[in-house]
Image (cartoon, rainbow, N blue to C red):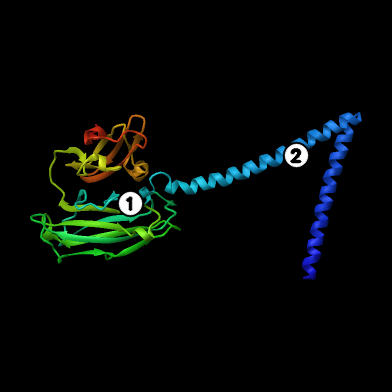
Amino acid sequence: MLGNRKAKNNKHKLQAEERRSLTASLNGAIDGMAKTPQTRKVLWAVAFVLVIAALVFGLRLTYSAFSANDHLKAVAVTGTSQSLFASDVLAPYSEKPAEPAAKSVVVDTSGDTCSFTFRVYNCMLDDTNVFNDKEVDYTLDIQASSTNGGTSITSGWSINPAAGTVTLPGTQAKIVTYTVTFNKALLNNIKFKIFANVVPDKSPGTNLACLAAAVTPAERAAVESASVTGSWADSGAVGDYAAYNYRINVTGKQQTVTLKWGEKVELDPHFATNHAGVNCTVNTDERTATFTMSPGSEIVNFYWVGGSAKPSSWEELGGSVQAGS
């Protein structure tokens, strides 16, 4: 304790000496420039104003630095925070649908079994430093049925990791990759209804009810002709939704796709980042996106532009696709 007291006394003495040294320096400078007492008073007033201005400027810089850091951390949850509870296959829903959007995935048929993967995550796929800073708990549920009549199929397929409840923490990025494997004999006769149901009381990081899709595995078609088609995947009245799912289908071969939309909706803000590896460009002024897509199906998310009149028909959303050159 005695040592601490001496250290504090020494520190106070040093600070006092520094203040005396600064005051003496200012006195010397002002005395050197002042030729009359009146001039000396004016110079002291100017020096005082400059010191106050420097202190205020320093405080503003410090505040700006903290504000900038807070903004960077808020990027993960600005606007549609549900964008950071997402999936590369499952579409987002604010209410759990009876029949989720259809999704076709191409599978390899060279072995006795076929498989496909999908991911659920709380971060940007190309930059895991940007993640949802609030926790999301979800329960994965998957059911298989026949494409003809919907008869339940309980054997001949599996999912890894097993279905169950998963926590996406608010402290770090997490990407959960699921692999669904099934017997080749079931191909063209099996579809999977997959839900990642949000646990509301434990999920401050999203206002979604679930991520979901009806996934139908398909064998790659051996055709030379190619096509690009698109349509709104949601059913019901357009006014019931604030977010919309647009399904794009590509057949035949890999193609450049140009996607267009109307002024009442805006594209998922993370679309360009999540498609960075497929020559993606987005022009928000012209409301177009161009990217490369392989044969298969993809769901693109759009959101209603707040403040504008809600659309009364699906046609008002203006979604369309075409194959590029």
Which residue is at the far left? 148
111 sits to left or right of 16? left
- In the displayed structure, 21 sits above or below 50; it is below
- In the displayed structure, 264 sits above or below 107; it is above
Mark 1 highlights which residue?
A: 208
* SS at circle 1: loop
User: Which of the 4 image quadrants contains residue 203?
Assistant: bottom left
Numbered tag placed on residue 273 in the rendering: none
* SS at circle 2: helix
Task: Tell me the residue at 54%/44% (across/down).
Answer: 68
- Foreground: disc 1 or disc 2: 1
Which residue is at the far right? 36
Three-letter amino acid code at disc 2?
Val
Three-letter amino acid code at disc 1?
Leu
Q: For the residue carrying disc 2, how many other residues have a C-alpha within 10 Å: few (<14), some (14-19), or many (20+)?
A: few
Residue 64: percent from left, percent from top: 58, 42
The residue closer to the viewer here, 249 or 209, is: 209
Mark 2 highlights which residue?
A: 51
One can see residue 33 in this view: no
